[in-house]
Image (spheres, rainbow, N blue to C red):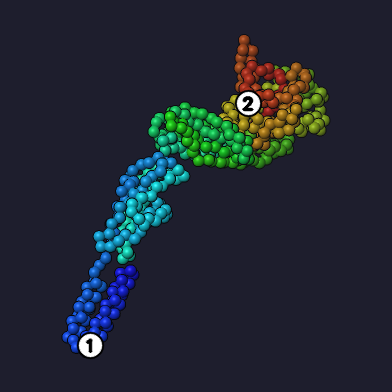
Amino acid sequence: MNSTKNTYNILFDLLNSIIILINFTKNNRPRYLSLICILAFSYILSSSCTKNDNPSVIILKPLNNESYFQGDTISISVEATDKDGIIEEVRVYIDGIGVTSLRQFPYTYLWNSSDEKVGAHLIKATALDIEGGVGEDTVRFFLTKPTPIVITKEVYDTATSKIYMSGEITDQGLSLVTETGFFWAINDTLEWNKRSLDPEMSEFTSSVFVYPDSTLYFKAYAINDHGESWGNLVSVIKKIPEIENGTFTDQRDGNTYKWIKLGNQIWMAENLRYLPSVNNVNEYSDSLPRFYVWNYNGNNVDEAKQLDTYRYNGVYYNWPASIIACPSGWHLATEEDWFALNGWLDNGLGRPGDQIRSDSGWIRGDNGLDYWGFNAIPAGENDNGEFQLSGLVTYFFTPEEYELHEISYANNITLTLENGDINFFKYNRKDRGLSVRCVKDQ
């Protein structure tokens, strides 16, 4: 466009000159007229056919693939020349964004990289001459950190419902990493806790307990001799996974029970209430089956079943009764069953015992979480003819036997409010009256 405009200007000037010369020579020198016209049009023709050369542009600094630290002030220096004209303007772009326009030599721009991202960046310089010609050059350079570069990731184990904080060091900086870890907080209070780890691996993880429906915030960090760096902030909401559940009716007496599937096991979610007979609280034995109902001292099954304690607590069985009490297709929960359940409950949602303790009935309001509806109520026991420890503890027999000094003992599982674990106890007397939980046969 500028080249065409200049040609028109030349034409205009020449035509004016021709008119003047014509006026000067029209009376006495007509031969000059032809000569002037020939010269004028020859000049016009040659001018219009001349091609403009684009400017030459070289980015002198930074060099291609050169590295700088984030925060450095980087000098961008451009050399621009035009052999057949004048440089009108030099423009500088960084990552496609124009940052400056330079109209005087030297063509230099200082770029502060403090707020710029770590990684590759592209500089482009363009030069425009007065004829409208354009030349350009590009270089790539990198921003790095003297401190480590670390990113934060979140790993959610759907099988166990655990949340793992994860970090990865992608660049250790100018010296070896001496410490890694996480800053973490629960919900939006952002009261930060710090967990330090040994810098053994470039990738590192750690788990943290989070109550369901709470939000965990965390970010990884890494330290070297030049300082500390933090990764991106990650947030994740802890959710309780859904489980299968249903009901089952015992055909022996018509009692209906809730069941839940935890892992690969189907558990009754209530204490067993099967009562083929009922014994007085003082009628205890370690060899013959005995069936008890809390605070009932008679032998009438129908009377015993009318009590709220029968419907709420279930039946208390001595060990010989417990191993025959579960309905067909079900069995008394074994040590192996309880160990498997304990492993499944190692899921980051709380201590295993607390997850299955009922959410009501425990003294001082120290109830369990009962996330899954297992409903392990604090039913207590019948021991030596006395019902006791209701609100404080619950016991479940298992079928395993152990001998000590030629005496046969039974194993039982204990849940207490003081200890949030599932506790395994051997060498328990078989004549005690404890609760029963059944597991479906596989």
* Front-most of residues 102 and 410: 102
Tell me the quarter of the picture where residue 300 sits. Answer: top right
Left or right of 234, for residue 14: left
Look at mark 1 in the image and give the residue it sits on: 26
Q: Position of residue 15 (x, y in %)?
A: 28, 80
- Disc 2/disc 1 C-alpha distance (Å): 122 Å
Element marked by disc 2: loop
Cβ atoms at labels 2 and 1 below 8 Å apart: no
Left or right of 41, for residue 165: right
| Quarter of the image where the C terminus is located | top right
- Residue 328 visible to the viewer: no
Residue found 77% across the figure and 27% down from its top: 293
Residue found 36% across the figure and 48% down from its top: 76
Element marked by disc 1: loop
Q: Position of residue 266 (x, y in %)?
A: 61, 36
Q: Earlier in the sequence, mark 2 or mark 1?
A: 1
Q: Position of residue 332 (x, y in %)?
A: 64, 28
- Density class for disc 1 (Cα within 10 Å; few <14, some 14-19, many ≥20) is few
Label total for image: 2
Q: Nearer the viewer, mark 2 or mark 1?
A: 1
Residue found 76% across the figure and 32% down from its top: 312
Look at mark 2 in the image and give the residue it sits on: 421
Image: 196 above or below 161: above
Q: Position of residue 287 (x, y in %)?
A: 69, 18
Q: Residue furthest bottom?
A: 27
* Front-most of residues 53 and 380: 53
Amino acid type at circle 1 is Lys
Left or right of 58, for residue 95: right
- Residue 255 visible to the viewer: yes
Residue found 34% across the figure and 49% down from its top: 77
Amino acid type at circle 2 is Asp
| Quarter of the image where the N terminus is located | bottom left
